[in-house]
Image (cartoon, rainbow, N blue to C red):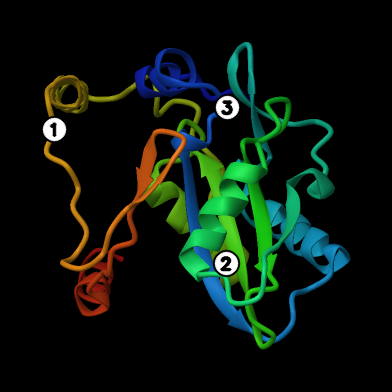
Amino acid sequence: MAVPLTGPDRLFLGEIGSARDHRLHLALAARRPGPAPDSGELRRLVAESAARAPVLTYRLARGGWEPDPAFDPACHVVEYRVAPGRDVGAAVVDAVRANRLLPDHPLWSLMVVHGYAADEHLLCYRAHHAFQDAVGAARVATRAVLLGRTVPAPDPDVAVRAPAGARMRLLATAARLAAPSARLRPPPGRTGRARAGARTFFLRLDLAAFREISAATG
């Protein structure tokens, strides 16, 4: 059953960018010990994750988001090798920029990034912002892909029964996005990397605070 497009969906896919625009992609990467898995192992992981989280099979269609009848795990596996010693954060950014999403398939991929070190690799879950927001991407990536847990299928009625309060918050958010915003600044001594007119910043997060929020909210 199709899940209707919401206002933000249309905004992200139409007015701001497209499915191929990496500036609207979210990426969650986990550093893992040992050599990178082969493509067959990653395809099995994708197939198992899609069975646990049906949302991973939803693609953009005329009626909204619909399950892909020809869902193929191979379309969602990407291998990206970087030079030895390459900065880990920069390697993830490079992988996202170099590998576009396929608009005829669900707008996400699982990337294995390796080569920067002999004793570890990265598993990176990347999704378009219209397909998932940061909370949704984190939920699927951690529960279904990394932890092997089940994530319920999308509810088609959510988009059409949003309460008035949620609609007002959406309008308020849109107003804030339209207004001039403060720049996100890195910690002292860290500089952004200019490329193609954009800047990328790597920031340190307080893991203790993240765990406290996670424990309180589930």
Q: What residue sits 53% from the left and 29% below the top? A: 21
Q: CA distance from mark 3 to mark 1?
A: 25 Å
Dividing the image into 4 quarters, which one contains the N terminus? top right
Q: Which residue is mark 3?
A: 19
Looking at the image, is mark 3 or mark 1 earlier in the sequence?
A: 3
Q: Amino acid at mark 1?
A: Ser
Question: Which circle's residue, 2 or 3, is located before the other in the chain?
Answer: 3
Local crowd size for mark 1, using a 10 Å CA cut-off: few (<14), some (14–19), many (≥20): few
Residue at mark 2 to residue at mark 3: CA–CA distance: 28 Å
Disc number at residue 22?
none
Residue at image position (71%, 54%) is 51
Quarter of the image where one finds residue 213: bottom left
Q: Quadrant of residue 86?
A: bottom right
Cβ atoms under marks 1 and 2 closer than 8 Å: no
- Of residues 68 and 81, the one drawn nearer to the viewer in this rendering: 81
Q: Amino acid at mark 2?
A: Arg
Identity of the residue drawn at 38% across and 38% down: 198
- Check whether the beta carbons of the residues at disc 3 and disc 1 lie within 8 A of each other: no
Q: Which residue bears the numbered disc 1?
A: 181
Whether residue 12 is visible: yes
Taking the spot 54% from the left edge, 43% from the top edge, the residue there is 127
Please tell me whether residue 168 is drawn above or below residue 38 in the rendered image: above
Give how far apart the Cα atoms at labels 1 and 2 are. Answer: 38 Å
Q: Where is residue 104 drawn, in percent x and y?
A: 73, 25
**Front label number (2 vs 3):** 3
Measured as percent of width and height from the top left, residue 19 is found at 57, 27
Task: Provide the residue designation for mark 2.
Answer: 149
- On the image, the x and y values in percent for residue 94 come to 57, 52
What's the residue type where badge 3 is placed? Ala
Q: Is residue 47 left or right of residue 1?
A: right
Residue 47 lies left or right of residue 207; in this view the side is right
Residue 177 at x, y percent in the picture: 20, 26
